[in-house]
Amino acid sequence: MEIAVFKNASTFSHPGRHASELKFLLSSLEEKPKKVLEVGSGCIEPIYFAQLLGSEATINAVDLNIKVYNTLTDLVSGKKVKLADLAEFVCNKSNDGKPRRNSDLLNEDRLKINAEELRLAGLNPNDFIRDGYYRMPKEGAKIIPINAELGEYTTQHQNEFDFVYAGVVLLNIGKVVNREGLVDTTKKLVGALKEGKVLGVGTNPAGMYGEKGTPGVLEDSGMATTDLIVDNLVLAKVGGKDRLFGGHCLRAVSVENQNSYSPIAKKTIEQRISEDEILSQAGITHREFNSSNLKGYFSEQGDNLLMVALRRDGGYDLWETPINKLKEVVPKVRYTFGIIPGLKYK
């Protein structure tokens, strides 16, 4: 795909996307959240997010796309939706803005990858995907579909939620606004959190670095990244060159929070890296970053890719690896790593 593709609004998702991240973020909370906000929710992700949360919680699922909203409303009401129908609008767009059918919802091999991502998070794929349909199980959190723009909605619902999850919304907003506008929107999102609560965000290898890099934007919005962990990667050829795509999970809390440190032990990450068949070959090295500010680290991307960052008193533990080495070992199909603590990894 040419870079222009990423300037078009995307509704792309697939069953299991971000499931590992959500599992980790929820397990890191001091108590189970009862009122949750998911922005840019899509119509697929809230269904299994509800299962991870449990029946005591409510998800306010906010999405601006009317097709997504209507479909999520149907799913919540008990209707089944054909995967083939979802593939028509839960998708990326071409340079001309036209939808590109979502092969993750149509191709059997990719559906198997989706199923594995659900299993890693402790979910049963058959609860959601069956006979070419997507559906919502009866158990789980209550979902309230909301058709609204993120900034407007969060402005009206400040200090209201026990947990906020933004997926890759900040990446998408950054495509169409300048940095000042991105920080302003992020502050509104952060403001929807109750004091001391956790914000979860998704990003990708390119989205961590540069002027609009997610960690830097969060810092300028009053948040400290406590954890940044690679979830999955895939090697794809773009313009004749191999490029890395995939996802990283960020956990962030207010910088004023006295417990704004990672809940993960250093030895846990080292063990997970050594046990993963891909990461153990990737030449990953550890170093200490003696600053509580990550923005400087992400000002520009060098020859390495950050795989994990854990916030400590006075700085971070970082694990990074040469991008060229990663390209030698990362497969050409999406591969979810077992590096996130709490996953049921083989």
Image (cartoon, grey):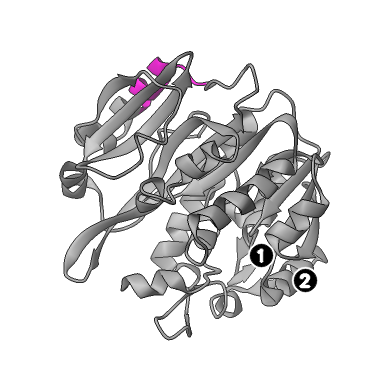
Compared with 67, 337 (above or below) is above
269 magenta-colored: yes
Q: Residues within 10 Å of mark 2 (few under 14, many from 20)?
A: some
The majority secondary structure of the magenta stretch comes to helix
Q: Type of residue at label 2?
A: Asp
Q: Is residue 235 visible?
A: yes
**Marked residue nearer the N-terminal end (2 or 1):** 1
Q: Kindly state the secondary structure of the residue where label 2 is placed.
A: helix
Q: Type of residue at label 1?
A: Cys
Residue drawn at point x = 83 percent, y = 66 percent = 77
Q: Which residues are magenta?
A: 264-272
Q: x and y percent of residue 316 in the render?
A: 41, 22
Q: Which residue in the protein does label 1 denote?
A: 43
Q: Which residue in the protein does label 2 denote?
A: 74
Quadrant in the picture for residue 339: top left
115 magenta-colored: no
Compared with 261, 76 (above or below) is below
- Relative placement, left or right, of 320 versus 57 is left
Image quarter in which the C terminus is found: top left
Residue drawn at point x = 36 percent, y = 46 percent = 209
Q: Is residue 16 visible?
A: no
